[in-house]
Amino acid sequence: MKIGDAVFIDILKDIASKNKTVIRLACKGRSKFEGWLKFEIAKKLAEERLEVSLEKNRFDIAVSDKKNDDFVIELKTANMNYRIRGIENKHRPVTKNFKGISKDIEKIKRSGKKGKVVFVVFPIPVNDGRYLKRIERVQKNTGVYIIQNFQHIENNYGIALCESEVINSKE
């Protein structure tokens, strides 16, 4: 696997499908799970025989393949305020969450390294596309394309798994 070609949404889908109880608990309490997710992603990358470092040079994950191609990953979990049956009502700093995603994209751009920002938006009511406007705003503000995939967790809510395109300011 060449790290720049990796599709992290596939990695996130696999992690989410194998850990629905953890995701469900995070959604119900609107609790961030970035630290746990970092270790799950790092484990998947290490299983591909990539050299993985955590918290290297202020990046969440740094990866090198056998050709010493360095690649960095920044992670975010963005909890939302949508009212959903069965989910605790808590106010969360949604705008701050998405500004953090934009800041991480800019951080990678300034570094001159290749990388991606990978994030999860949660909980989201089923058939409710309001969160897409937040993602579109990040794209507009940073000039970086983001792909997303909605995953059902329960009948009435789910999560959005998202990743930026490869960011490389040297090209």
Image: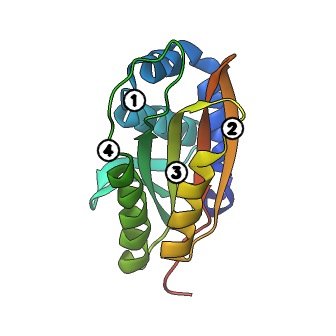
Q: Earlier in the sequence, mark 3 or mark 2?
A: 3
The residue that mark 1 highlights is 36
Is disc 4 placed on a helix, strand or loop? loop
Q: Nearer the viewer, residue 116 or 123?
A: 123
The residue that mark 3 highlights is 118
Distance CA(mark 4)–CA(mark 2): 21 Å
Q: Residue at x 45, y 34 (%)?
A: 37
Q: Residue at x 56, y 68 (%)?
A: 139
x, y percentage for residue 106? 40, 72
Q: Quadrant of the C terminus?
A: bottom right
- Tell me the number on the disc at residue 150: 2
Q: Earlier in the sequence, mark 1 or mark 2?
A: 1
Is disc 3 placed on a helix, strand or loop? strand
Q: Residue at x 47, y 23 (%)?
A: 27
Q: Earlier in the sequence, mark 4 or mark 1?
A: 1
Q: Label 4: how many residues lie within 10 Å, few (<14), some (14-19) or many (20+)?
A: few
Q: How many marks?
A: 4
